[in-house]
Amino acid sequence: MTSSNNTTDNDEWVVCPECGGWGEYEVEVAVIDHMNGGYLTEAKEECEMCGGAGEVLAEDLEMQIEVFLEGGDGYH
């Protein structure tokens, strides 16, 4: 059965691995200051993976691509 938000009753939601469930994360932003050389400051940005919800569908995580580097280390 499909609910009003287009998800089925058996969809399993898990904590977003990108933001840890916070829905946002901190990034460094460069501030231009010609007199003093500029500086970096922190800002919060909405997580692109979960759209700020903090949770993603478990089946969406299965779609990640794994790349193997020459040294044998894997990258997801």
Image (tube, rainbow, N blue to C red):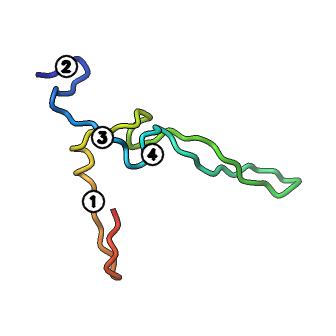
* Residue 17 picture location, percent across and down: 38, 49
In percent of width and height, residue 16 lies at: 37, 43
Alpha carbon distance from label 3 to label 2 = 19 Å
Q: Residue at x 26, y 39 (%)?
A: 57
Crowd class of label 4 (few under 14; some 14 to 19; many from 20; radius 10 Å): many
What element does badge 2 sit on? loop
Q: Residue 3, labelled with which disc?
A: 2
Residue at image mark 3: 14
Who is closer to the viewer here, 30 or 43? 43
N-terminal-most mark, 4 or 3: 3
Q: Position of residue 26 (x, y in %)?
A: 57, 46
Which numbered disc, 3 or 2, marks the residue closer to the eye?
3
Amino acid of disc 2:
Ser
Amino acid type of the residue that numbered disc 3 sits on in the rendered structure: Val
Classify the position of the N terminus by image quarter. Answer: top left
Kindly indicate whether the residue at mark 2 contacts the one at mark 1 (C-beta within 8 angstroms): no
Distance of mark 4 from mark 1, alpha carbons?
19 Å
- 2 or 4: mark nearer the eye: 4
Percent position of residue 74, x then y: 32, 71
The residue depicted at 40 percent of the width and 37 percent of the height is: 54
Q: Is residue 6 above or below residue 24?
A: above
User: Mark 2, residues whose alpha carbon is within 10 Å: few (<14), some, or many (≥20)?
Assistant: few
Image quarter for residue 59?
top left
Identify the element where label 4 is drawn.
loop
Q: Quickly name the residue at label 1.
A: 65
* Vertical arrangement, residue 63 with respect to residue 44, above or below: below
Residue located 50% across and 38% down the image: 46
Real-space Cα separation, disc 1 to disc 2, in angstroms: 30 Å
- Whichever of labels 1 and 2 marks the residue nearer the N terminus, that label is 2
Residue that label 4 marks: 19
- Say above or below: 32 vs 23: below
Residue type indicated by callout 4: Cys
